[in-house]
Amino acid sequence: MKTPPLQLAEAQARLLALAPSLSVEHRAVAECLGHYIATPLHARRTQPAAPLSAMDGHAMRAADLPGPWRVIGESAAGHPFGGTVGRGEAVRISTGAMLPAGADMVLLQEDSARDGETLTLTGEPPAPPGRHIRPAGMDFTADTTLIEAGTRIGPAQIALAIAAGHSHLAVRRPLRLTVIDSGDELVRPGNTTRLHQLPASNGPMLCAMASALPCDISHIGPIADRIEDLAAALDGAHEADVVVTSGGASVGDHDLVRPALEAVGAKIDFWRVGIKPGKPLLVATRGNQVIIGLPGNPASAFVTAFLFLLPLLRASLGAASPLPRTIPARLAGPMGPGGSRMEFLRAHWDGNGVTLDELQDSGALSPLARANALVVREAGSERKEGGTDVPIYLLENGGIA
Ligand SMILES: Nc1nc2c(c(=O)[nH]1)N[C@H]1C(S)=C(S)[C@@H](COP(=O)(O)OP(=O)(O)OC[C@H]3O[C@@H](n4cnc5c(N)ncnc54)[C@H](O)[C@@H]3O)O[C@H]1N2
Ligand code: MOO
């Protein structure tokens, strides 16, 4: 199968079109952190339900300025004043308390003096008079759409959904993700390594990248470079929605992912993308299951997980915008010309400029751990001087989705 590599956008579109669709379930709001809401969220109530005071002071009629007033009662948060404020009357009011009927102004405590039941103006009245009043529906009104379908649920969305009167939200069921490490040179993390060996670090890295998404993750391996062993691992993962392997995706005699996929009846959708690192990326399907074969080099595995695996997981989980987005950033120094593939250079952005790491070998992990950004260098692009804007992907939280 020697077709030319796909371009990034085409490969991403092909992969996302395969995203397994997961059933929708209803989950307690507080347990929805990191999920994507499956249906638009409508407000079940109006907030504030009634006009509230935004400050501590006294409520009265603006028409009665400049006072004085006679204080006839109190409105505290959770304890509204039962009566109506009439001419020359005021009600003591606290922040968050309901504005009493008849009142249309809150005079700050600092701008008044109280002597028994008598209140006098000592400072400036509010301008306009309703300045310290939060009108009913200021935040939202019943039946309006508050959150669009496909939005990620974060702390603010949890608070908003609860404030809007919801106890449960419609979200996709957790995605079953199986991560497989394979290679004869790999040993379990923490075990002794001989000269020809190294610890299997890709699997734990990939699990960590997916950890903030609602996924049930199982990690298999490291397993040996044998078609039967890899096929057995793939068979064992038949219930997963998405399976991800790393290594063995290239053209060497021991690159067994493709034959193993064929052995378990998976259908290869595409292989190879014109990106660096990450060219040997492979995508296959088995029924509704999507299998992604990432290249083994650690930086290649990271970059392809960032550009392909995480978007696939987000799309399956119902994200409206599953792909990462670039932002422009100023190069701190010059950047050489682009090569034959689109590149994703490990870099550090300090909030002002972006500096490329000197070590860009896809086998190196230390630059990845130093990086908080990937600089995009287009294939065939010209050398760029320091001060030029380039597109970067920010690796927020180290690349966790
Ligand atoms: N003749 C060619 N050789 C290579 C090509 C090519 O087009 N022609 N492509 C190169 C590119 S680009 C990449 S990327 C690598 C990727 O190859 P594989 O996906 O087959 O990966 P492996 O060869 O199995 O491993 C590469 C490297 O990564 C280490 N590795 C693998 N798995 C893990 C793991 N779970 N944890 C940590 N490290 C891992 C492995 O030990 C190797 O050092 O192929 C080029 N070759
Ligand atoms: O494209 Mo590979 O991923 O150079 O290392």
Image (cartoon, grey):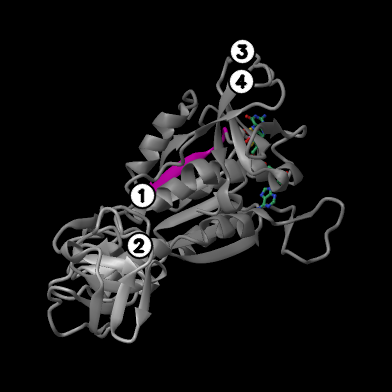
Q: Is residue 109 visible in the rendered structure shown here?
A: yes
Q: Which residue is mark 1?
A: 315
Q: Are marks 4 and 1 in contact (CB under 8 Å)?
A: no
Q: Per the image, is 122 magenta?
A: no
Q: Mark 4 or mark 1, which is nearer to you?
A: 4
Q: Secondary structure at mark 2?
A: helix
The residue drawn where x is 27% and y is 76% is 167
Could you say where residue 19 lies in the image, as x and y percent from the top left?
A: 34, 49
In this view, the residue farthest toward the top is 382
Q: CA distance from mark 2 to mark 4?
A: 37 Å
Which residue is tagged 4? 388
Ligand 1 located in image quadrant: top right
Q: Please say if 105 is above or below 332.
A: below
Helix, strand or loop at label 4? It is loop
Amino acid bearing label 3: Glu
Q: CA distance from mark 4 to mark 1?
A: 33 Å
